[in-house]
Image: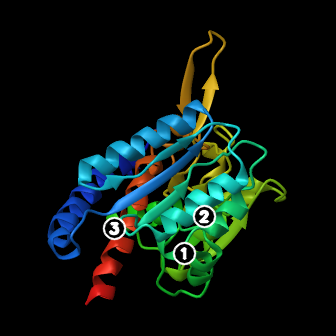
Amino acid sequence: METNTAKLLDGKALATKIQQELSATITRLQPHIGRPPGLAVLMVGDNPASAAYVRGKERACTKIGMASFGKHFPTQTTQAELEEVIHHLNQDERVDGILVQLPLPNHLDAISLLHQIDPGKDADGLHPVNLGKLLRSEPGLRSCTPAGVMRLLQEYEISLRSKQAVVVGRSILVGKPLALMLLEADATVTIAHSRSHNLPAITKNADILIAAVGRPELITAQMVKPGAVVVDVGINRVTDDNGNSRLVGDVQFESVANVAEFLTPVPGGVGPMTVAMLLQNTVDSYSQRLKTKE
């Protein structure tokens, strides 16, 4: 039996292309605005995964000519201290994007902090004002990971109109905003989750299948319609019997690659796109300053 091997949706290559475009935009706008765009990433505590993500974001800033105003706080930092920092950054003319790196230590209220960010500087696109704009199909800053998924599909000219799209996962970070974006692109959207009855029957119906639940290799080949487009948002670290750890997605890559037409790798698929969209949001916010100057 001849096996099909899915074409890869290369998020890493597209993220590099987007960064080059953003760098050119910054070079063009900077003489008019009088400063580079600025991004402030706030991190609390010493979560190694978060620290690695923050370093990656700061490196990406430097690469495209963006100023980084990152702040790293000790674990015991209070809610009031962080709110005060956010208020200062809201007022700081040099800062166009503010992001609170999650997860936060348990004593802090992430949602309350998010509400303190000026919606015009909400680089993560998760403020209720920006989510409301998405719901109403109005222009605004969009959630980075879902926006990255949509940009990846667009780059590979994958049409969404009239297609059956299934999103597995209903988080406010990915599942819910992504469902709205797919709907806006004229797809017929189903959201499945841990309480969905007979998940394989739902996923097997999808022309576009997006896995965003954080469960290693949940989606198997038997759950995928032949010729489907499969996007894996999951990033899970798993350890084998010998103690070796590796990153896997929510999709069983090797088996699904024999069934799907397109598939994102993990790592190198959606992850780099999330950072690219964070930079895109910050540059969009930066370019708005020029409009207010004119």
Could you tell me the amino acid type at mark 3? Val
- Which of labels 1 and 2 is toward the front? 1
For the residues labelled 1 and 2, the Cα–Cα distance comes to 34 Å
Q: Around disc 3, counting alpha carbons within 10 Å, would you say few (fewer than 14), some (14 to 19), or many (20 or more)?
A: many
Q: Earlier in the sequence, mark 2 or mark 3?
A: 2
Q: Which of 209 and 97 is in front in this view?
A: 97
Count of numbered marks: 3
Q: Quadrant of residue 169?
A: bottom right
Q: Mark 3 points at which residue?
A: 283
Q: Which of 243 and 50 is in front in this view?
A: 50
Image quarter where the C terminus lies is: bottom left
Compared with 176, 226 (above or below) is above
Contact check, label 1 and label 2, Cβ < 8 Å: no
Compared with 214, 123 (above or below) is below
Residue drawn at (38%, 69%), measured in percent from left and top? 93
Q: Mark 2 points at which residue?
A: 206
- Which of labels 2 and 3 is toward the front? 3
Coordinates of residue 44 in the picture (x, y in percent): 61, 42
Badge 2 marks a residue whose secondary structure is loop
Could you tell me the amino acid type at mark 2? Ala
Coordinates of residue 249 in the picture (x, y in percent): 57, 40
Coordinates of residue 1 in the picture (x, y in percent): 47, 38
Identify the disc placed on residue 119: 1
* Residue 152 seen in the current view: yes
